[in-house]
Amino acid sequence: NAGVTQTPKFQVLKTGQSMTLQCAQDMNHEYMSWYRQDPGMGLRLIHYSVGAGITDQGEVPNGYNVSRSTTEDFPLRLLSAAPSQTSVYFCATGLAGAYEQYFGPGTRLTVT
Amino acid sequence: KQEVTQIPAALSVPEGENLVLNCSFTDSAIYNLQWFRQDPGKGLTSLLLIQSSQREQTSGRLNASLDKSSGRSTLYIAASQPGDSATYLCAVKPGTASKLTFGTGTRLQVTL
């Protein structure tokens, strides 16, 4: 039981490049989400999903794309990386409803 | 819009002291509140989850309380140890959606 896994752990991109951050879970949780963490700003929600085939925008969705084709995976795509997207990205999962959420180890992204 | 504030932003205490971390939120219509611990460069570890109908939760040396009507939660750490040094984050779940709104955290250092 791996819980929530994220790959890669670290990534450096040049401005304009695209990439996909991977998130996978083996807990059969319906809910998955992506947050970014920036100094002094706390964690902010980017996109979330309440089940396969269903996604919605969070607080800071611009520049990011998501899809949810399976329960287990929820990839986050950066379409054209910008220095403002330099951040630490966390994936979280949980059961729908008033249950606790579990976070992955994070991906540290630098855009130059 | 829900806003979550954590005071103080940083705290340094000698080993063995009892301490209290504070979390306040502006909208009392929450489903639950979750306290997390984050070690430098690592992901978030869930410490305690308090449902909106509960007043407190305990786990070992940790006790979290919730006063929904006043928009406040406290995390009490008894007999602090150097291993407790980390950033502590609180997050509220507003309403039926699973998305969390985070505070910016309290960075705790426990010295020998």
Image (cartoon, coloured by chain):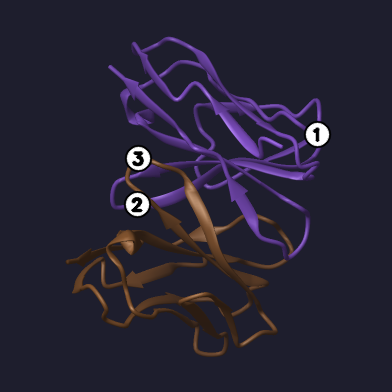
Q: Secondary structure at mark 2?
A: loop
Along the horizontal axis of the image, is A72 left or right of B48?
A: right
Between A46 and B67, the one lying in front of the other is: B67
Between B58 and A106, the one lying in front of the other is: B58
Viewer-side label of 2, 1 = 1
Percent position (x, y) of residue A81? 42, 18
Discs 1 and 3 carry the same chain letter? no
Residue that carries the numbered disc 3 in the rendered image: B41
Q: Secondary structure at mark 3?
A: loop
Spatial CA distance of label 3 from label 2 is 16 Å
Residue that carries the numbered disc 2 in the rendered image: A41
Residue under the point 40% across and 11% down: A16
The chain shown in brown is which?
A: B
Percent position (x, y) of residue B104? 36, 59
Q: Amino acid at mark 1?
A: Thr
Number of numbered callouts drawn:
3
Rate crowding at label 1 as few (under 14), some (14 to 19) or many (20 or more) other CA atoms within 10 Å. Answer: many
Residue that carries the numbered disc 1 in the rendered image: A71
Residue under the point 44% across and 50% down: A43
Percent position (x, y) of residue A40? 29, 52
Percent position (x, y) of residue A39? 29, 46
Viewport quadrant of the C terminus of chain B: bottom left
Between B87 and A87, the one lying in front of the other is: B87
The chain shown in purple is which?
A: A
Chain to which the residue tagged by mark 2 belongs: A
Chain to which the residue tagged by mark 3 belongs: B
Residue under the point 58% across and 58% down: B100
Q: Are marks 3 and 2 in contact (CB under 8 Å)?
A: no
